[in-house]
């Protein structure tokens, strides 16, 4: 099987590559000139790299050629955070990400791809209606440009699917945590580092999280799986506040750090029934503890 993947050089892409090479697959990866592929060197014999971007039609044509499945994870943000990139230069953002995604969908159709998997985001929900279950059928009213972009690509995915171009599967993860190949980019890195070194920390905020291995498992389960055709899956494990992360790290070190701040409570819960039915078994609090423990050992 050949799988064409965008975003392979990113955090999630690194884990997807590791998982897919447990299968007998060859990967065709779309990368930019500036992409760092050092963390993929163990797999390079099974990867064909295509240099270019989502706006280059000729490159996209070669990229999808002969592939059975496309997995679209790429998001051009030029070093900014997800939301900052969407607010910086809206014209550039739309051209590179939204129009680029549409070009990819069209190249996939022309190339005879059988399945298109899109990694969306729970940012599509935006405004949450308290009396409506927060599952995949909840109304979409994004409150950010990033969320609006994801909603738009989802809509185009459905359009191609309903016109019988190819099967689609869409995943909406919350905040993904796990060891990043670039360690300092790992979730809660600064909090854990300060705790380990005995520094005092002031924490706030929190968010819904999911382990990167659970996201990868969901993608793996969807590949070449007719049962996922046309479906959307929330990928969410639980809510955790940064105060809890700091306390967890302090217990594991141990540390003399003083922790201050106000714990932030969850406002709502995202339903993950559909992803559990697919076969995702979430890491839970024990998975989070394993991650914090490993992060401590590497700092």
Image (tube, helix red, strand yellow):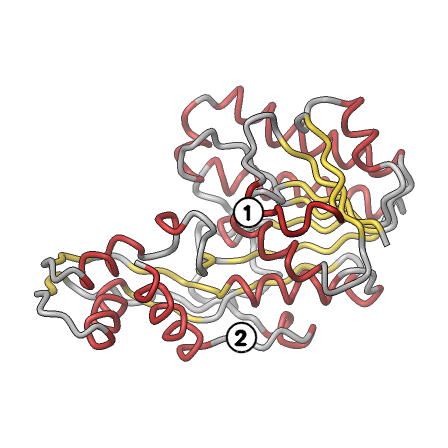
Q: Residue at x 62, y 73 (%)?
A: 280
Q: Is residue 53 above or below residue 298?
A: above
**Which of 240/27 is in front?**
27
**Image quadrant for the N terminus?**
bottom right
- Tell me the quarter of the picture where residue 9 sits: top right
Query: Which quarter of the rendering shows the C terminus?
Result: bottom left
Residue 136: quarter of image: bottom right
The residue identified by callout 1 is 39
Label placed on residue 94: none
Residue 282 image point, x, y percent = 53, 75
Note whether residue 127 is visible: yes
Residue that label 2 marks? 282
Is 78 positioned to the left or the right of 249 in the image? right
Secondary element at image label 1: helix
Counting residues from the N terminus, which is met first, the one under dot 1 or under dot 2? 1
Relative placement, left or right, of 32 versus 283 is right
On the image, the x and y values in percent for residue 117 come to 72, 51
Local crowd size for mark 1, using a 10 Å CA cut-off: few (<14), some (14–19), many (≥20): few
* Nearest to viewer (mark 1 / mark 2): 1
Residue displayed at 13% across by 57% down: 202
């Amino acid at each position: 099987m050949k799988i064409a993947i965008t975003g392979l050089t990113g955090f999630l892409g690194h884990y997807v590559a590791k998982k897919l090479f447990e299968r007998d697959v060859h990967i065709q990866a779309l990368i930019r000139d500036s992409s760092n592929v050092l963390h993929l060197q163990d797999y390079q014999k099974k990867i064909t790299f295509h240099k270019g971007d989502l706006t280059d039609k000729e490159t996209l044509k070669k990229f999808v050629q002969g592939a059975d499945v496309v997995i679209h994870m790429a998001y051009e943000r030029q070093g900014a955070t997800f939301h900052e990139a969407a607010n910086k230069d809206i014209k550039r953002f739309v051209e590179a990400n939204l129009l680029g995604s549409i070009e990819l969908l069209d190249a996939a159709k022309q190339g005879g791809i059988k399945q298109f998997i899109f990694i969306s985001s729970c940012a599509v929900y935006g405004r949450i209606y308290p009396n409506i279950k927060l599952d995949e059928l909840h109304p979409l009213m994004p409150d950010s440009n990033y969320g609006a972009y994801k909603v738009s690509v989802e809509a185009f995915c459905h359009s191609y699917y309903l016109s019988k171009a190819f099967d689609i599967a869409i995943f909406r993860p919350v905040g993904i945590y796990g060891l990043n190949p670039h360690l300092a980019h790992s979730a809660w890195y600064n909090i854990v580092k300060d705790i380990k070194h005995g520094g005092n920390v002031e924490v706030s905020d929190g968010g819904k999280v999911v382990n990167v291995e659970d996201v990868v498992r969901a993608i793996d389960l969807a590949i070449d799986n007719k049962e996922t055709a046309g479906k959307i899956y929330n990928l969410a494990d639980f809510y955790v506040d940064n105060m809890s992360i700091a306390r967890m790290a302090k217990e594991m070190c141990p540390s003399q750090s003083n922790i201050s701040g106000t714990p932030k409570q969850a406002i709502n819960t995202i339903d993950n029934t559909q992803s559990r039915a697919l076969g995702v078994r979430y890491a839970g609090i024990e998975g989070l503890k394993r991650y914090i423990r490993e992060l401590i050992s590497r700092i």
